[in-house]
Image: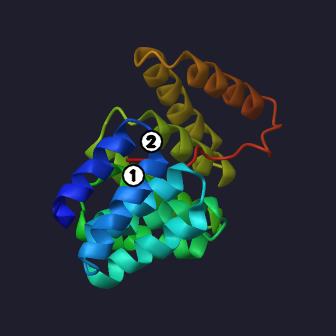
Amino acid sequence: MSASDWIKRGMKKAQAGNYDGAISDYTQAILLQSNCPEAYCGRGNAYYRLNNKIRALEDYTHAITLKPEFSEAYFNRGTARSQLGNSQGALEDFSRVVHLSPRDAKAHFNWGNAHYRLGHKQEAIEGYSRAIQLQPDYAEAYSNRGLAHCKMQAVGTGLLDLHKAATLYKTQGNMSRHWQTQQTIAKFHSDSASATQVRGESAR
């Protein structure tokens, strides 16, 4: 079997939820073709699904070294870095993604999240706004932009976004998020939203 064949096998196993098997197949691909960025990225994804984010980071970084314009690897490394608490590293990766893939709404959303966690509320709003321009029904982007506006004391503007998010969640059948957003709106009305956090990174 060729490296490409092993990668295809790994992808199928990952899609079926067999991440250990996927790692084994991607490793076989790497043994046959050590300069294959797709094999490293795929194995990184499998490690990530197994919650081994350190090994995932190593593989994403190796993939990027081999293919410096590899948007998917930057996106996935940024997501892993964010979940490991490295917001600055996540911002660097998502900045690269929005440069390489400027019409990727999820990348702009995650870029906004990284800025939000670093305390850059205005930049966060810009990221969420760009995500909404690209994907007008992006409920999470409305929700997070609303929270950022509220944190900047633009509560009226923020509540408009939160109401829009709640409506979109309901339309999309996500009643859990709909009610959570309604509760957040009520908290802001009662001036007790200090513990409210933005929605996490969008995944592929």
Identify the mark at residue 65; answer none if there is no mark.
none
Q: Which residue is mark 1?
A: 22
Amino acid on which disc 1 is placed: Ala
- Residue drawn at (57%, 75%), measured in percent from left and top? 88
Regarding residue 141, the answer to whether it shows in the image is yes
**Could you say which is closer to the camera, residue 69 or residue 135?**
69
Number of marks in the rendered image: 2
Query: Mark 1 to mark 2: distance in Å?
Result: 6 Å
| Local secondary structure at mark 1 | helix
Which of the image's four quarters has the N terminus? bottom left
Identify the mark at residue 18; answer none if there is no mark.
2
- Residue drawn at (41%, 19%), measured in percent from left and top? 172
| Local secondary structure at mark 2 | loop
Regarding residue 99, the answer to whether it shows in the image is no
- Find out whether the residues at labels 1 and 2 contact each other: C-beta distance under 8 Å: yes
How packed mark 2 is, by other alpha carbons closer than 10 Å (few <14, some 14-19, many 20 or more), is some
Q: Quadrant of residue 23?
A: bottom left
In percent of width and height, residue 109 lies at 43, 52
In this rendering, the answer to whether 195 lies above or below 159 is: below
In percent of width and height, residue 106 lies at 37, 50
**Could you say which is closer to the camera, residue 136 or residue 48?**
48
